[in-house]
Image: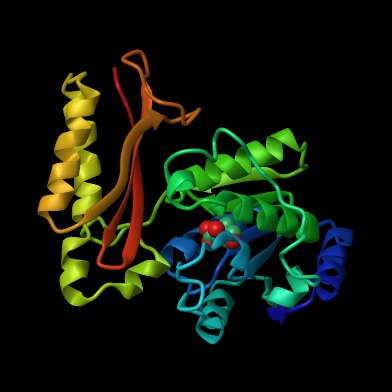
Amino acid sequence: MNTLHTIAQLRAAVSRARQEGKRIGLVPTMGNLHAGHIALVEKALQRTDYVVVSIFVNPLQFGAGEDLDSYPRTLPEDQAKLHEIGTHMIFAPSVSDIYPEGMEGHTRVAVPVVSEGLCGSSRPGHFEGVATVVNKLLNIVQPDLAIFGQKDFQQLAVIRKMAHDLCMPVQIMGEPTVRAADGLALSSRNGYLNAEQRACAPVLYRTLQQIAEKLQAGRQDFATVIDEAQAQLVDAGLTPDYLDLRDAHSLQPVTTATRELVALAAAYLGKTRLIDNLQFSLA
Ligand code: PAF
């Protein structure tokens, strides 16, 4: 396994693999890999013959005052983990490889509607940054399959819509969230939590589970169920950013006719912003 840093090197390596008849897989990441990322790479290794993992902390998707500078950069540890599971190639470009003329006048990919609300409201420009860099990574690697985690539910919806609308010749796959034993979704940002916050963090997922249980038990007063859940988060010491119910396919607001739902939440624990979601069905 090699780590390549430039677009030209990566393209040459992937092109050799493709000439050998290999199916190409891509797992885009920002590094600081945990078991959730490793599950994505393992899935890509099962489904394709040559797996590229990109590691790039994309400044275009961070807003002013967010954690771009403190985001953990752990390339040697990431390389060791990826080597151990048989990854074929790491692509770890620098910011100037991806944005050689800077970000200011760079072309941006906007995916309307599905990017709006939820994280799109709290993090203006975030999904434009994500869609732009993922578009670039897909153009650089030209994989047959690209895999993303379902923890970033709205991000996955944005990427699927972009690939569909722009007729991109790639299969986009979402893989289930990997959780700690107490239910907390694995995230690189969990590392920001102190011991007390870490003990409290699983309440986010428990709250989503309780929303699902209440609706599955027949409650149709969605707004009250959400208010109860918000209150529970506040009682536990979290500051909710949003807590919402959406149609799991369209991400549009639910009605009493919606059968496939997703409860989505973002909340602050101290300065750390945690997100999570839970998909469920109603009979
Ligand atoms: O989910 C992430 O790690 C990032 O948003 C992604 C998809 C790698 C784009 O930078």
Residue, x 57% and y 81% (percent of image)? 79
Q: Residue at x 64, y 67 (%)?
A: 54
Could you say which quadrant of the image residue 52 lies in? bottom right
Residue at point 57% right, 60% down? 61
As drawn, the residue found furthest toward the bottom would be: 76
Q: Is residue 269 above or below residue 253?
A: below
232 or 74: nearer the viewer: 232
Q: Position of residue 174 (x, y in %)?
A: 53, 46
- How many tags in the picture? 0
Is 62 placed above or below 109 here? below
Q: Position of residue 220 (x, y in %)?
A: 21, 18
Question: Where, by quadrant of the figure, is residue 140 drawn?
Answer: bottom right
Quarter the N terminus occupies: bottom right
Q: Left of 5 or right of it: where is 60?
A: left
> Residue 18: image x %, image y %?
84, 59
Whether residue 11 can be seen here: yes
Query: Would residue 153 be seen by someone viewing this image from the given angle?
Result: no
Q: If the picture is divided into quarters, which one holds ligand 1?
A: bottom right
Residue 137 position within the rendered picture, expressed as x and y whole percent measured from the top left: 72, 59
Q: Nearer the viewer, residue 12 or 63?
A: 63
Name the residue at the top extreme. Answer: 257
Work out whether residue 124 or residue 9 is closer to the camera in this orientation and state it. 124
| Quadrant holding the C terminus | top left
Colouring chosen for the image of the structure = rainbow
In the picture as drawn, the residue positioned furthest to the left comes out as 235
Residue at horizontal 74 percent and vertical 49 percent from the top: 144
Residue closest to the eye, 201 or 4: 201
Q: Is residue 109 above or below residue 117?
A: below
